Amino acid sequence: MTIKDMIKPNILATPPSGIRKYFDLINEMKDAISLGIGEPDFETPWTIREEGIYSLEKGKTFYSSNAGFIELRQEIARYMARKYNLEYDPSTEILVTVGGSEAIDITLRTFAGPGDEVIVPEPSFVAYKGCTMFCGATPVPLELKAEYEFRIQPEQILSCITEKTRAIILAYPNNPTGAIMEYEDYAKIVEVLRDKDIIVISDELYSELNYKGKHVSIAQFPEMKEKTIVINGFSKAFAMTGWRIGFACGHADAMEQMKKIHQYAIMCSPTTAQFAAIEALRNGEPEVRKMVDEYNRRRRVMVDGFNRIGLKCFEPYGAFYCFPDIRSTGLSSDEFCERLLMEEKVLTVPGNAFGACGEGFVRATYATSLENIREALTRIARFVERVRA
Amino acid sequence: MQQEILDILQKNSRISDEELAVMLGTDAATVRAAIKEMEDKGIITGYKTLIDWEKAQEEVVVAYIEVRVTPQRGQGFDKVAERIYQYPQVTACCLMSGGFDLFVVVEGKTMKEVALFVAEKLATIDSVLSTSTHFVLKKYKENGVIFNRPRKDEREAVVL
């Protein structure tokens, strides 16, 4: 028996992230522009970094309580109330995690296991499917449609539900499409979900990056709050990706069990990051506004650019991604991305890396400088013209 | 929209009306009209370029000067400030609270040139009581721009 034979089949069966494919290629290229990176190009605001540094200088290098410093949980509770009108008890209903990623993992591990099904809307962040499979559960893809601007429809949910369905993942503002869900969109799916024993895992990491209006959470519907786990974090809003800090909010009975997994697997989130996060919630808001304004300008430039080139792009009102339709070029997503990278040195991510139904689209992020965006658009225009000729 | 246009222009005054319009989700004519209005009202007073003169191999000496003056009846500090800021060597001049009255920035080619300007022109103005000259040795940050800090994208090309 080789070591590979000793690995659990469900781990082997889970494919690695398709986004990584072009990694080695682009690293060797000169003058390449990456529209592939799913993280802010801004450094963490200085006031936040400085608190992290200060905590180290004071020798604050010990474990925190498992759920995270109570001061941080109190700030999170205030933040959720202030921004999203959601009340959570900091002592029992909030858990500080190692990024939103850990929160997704432990929520799935708490609610889904072998024989269970989890509805995973696609195209979506690649970790949902992987984490579901690691639990031994089966991800059931729900195909989001461009004609609905990738907003989830009640009848789509109904057609995915079986007696094995344990949970559904909602992720708006959405990676990779940039789609959002507004109040009326949620109202329609709440009709379907309200009387079902299905946990809603609502990944709202991009909640601050909404360019249309106020972010809406499904947990704001009173009948949904108890069975919704809201996941959020600091990576996208406060440009804190490398700090690895996020949180989950939900019913105390759920959080208590999730905390057990967190306790045994992680112990506690990095404390330097926790101190920095407290500062982010107390004083980071003005810097967030500046970053959001900047993203919004770049967003308009990119959407305008794709539409001019003739790559139809619905208006993405959230996150920092555009998801243009490239079918008019006659190329598949993979062909488009590979040729664009080789011929014009611009990296985009094929839509099918986020689920089969992402075929025909590519993801391009505007979390890069305006100069890069403009240059990339010029190169893409040249490329598309050549392909069509 | 005014505020947003100003935000953008403050960082990049070379941007075209068309580019601005796309960034703000409007059309170029609207942007042009708004800028014209702000120019007419004196909200926008000019367009400059930020230059790190040291890198341009041009020797520039900058001095920050604290000036104490006797205010003149009926004209306060304005009259003496006017006499000072008219000199082309003076690149900034403000009335201050605290231990001195006027804060004056003077630029020249050499330290001697600046020192002579202060001694011969500034200090000799009637109502000037005293001057205190501080030469700038190194500029770290000016107008919100940090000097000598190349911004390199250190993000991993692809993570997930």
Image (cartoon, coloured by chain):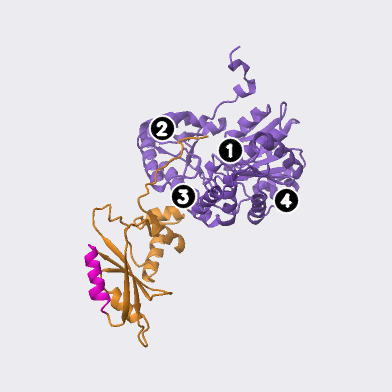
Chain colours: A purple, B orange
Please determine if labels 2 and 3 lie on a single subunit. Answer: yes
Q: Position of residue A49 (x, y in %)?
A: 51, 50
Residue B86 point in image, percent of width and height: 27, 74
In which chain is the residue bearing label 4?
A: A
Mark 2 or mark 1: which comes first in sequence?
2
Location of residue A276 with respect to B119 vertically, above or below: above
The mark tally for this picture is: 4
Q: Amino acid at mark 1?
A: Lys
Circle 2: element type? helix
Q: Reading the chain from its start, which is encountered first: label 4 or label 2?
A: 2
Circle 4 residues within 10 Å: few <14, some 14–19, many ≥20: some
Q: How far separated are the C-alphas under marks 2 and 3?
A: 26 Å
* Residue B121 magenta: yes
Residue A26: give its label: 2
Spatial CA span between label 2 and label 1: 31 Å
Residue displayed at 58% across by 17% down: A4
Q: Residue at x 32, y 61 (%)?
A: B136
Q: Earlier in the sequence, mark 3 or mark 1?
A: 1
Residue tagged 3: A300
Q: Which residues are magenta?
A: B109-124
What residue sits right under mark 4 in the picture? A89
Q: Amino acid at mark 3?
A: Arg
How far separated are the C-alphas under marks 3 and 1? 22 Å
Nearest the camera: A72 or B50? A72
Could you say whether the residue bearing mark 3 is in a helix, strand or loop?
A: helix
Chain of the residue that carries numbered disc 1 in the rendered image:
A
Q: Nearer the viewer, mark 2 or mark 3?
A: 2
Residue A381 at x, y percent in the picture: 38, 40
Q: Which residue has dot 1 on it?
A: A145
- Residue type (three-letter) at the residue carrying disc 4: Asp
Q: Which image quarter: residue B155?
A: top left
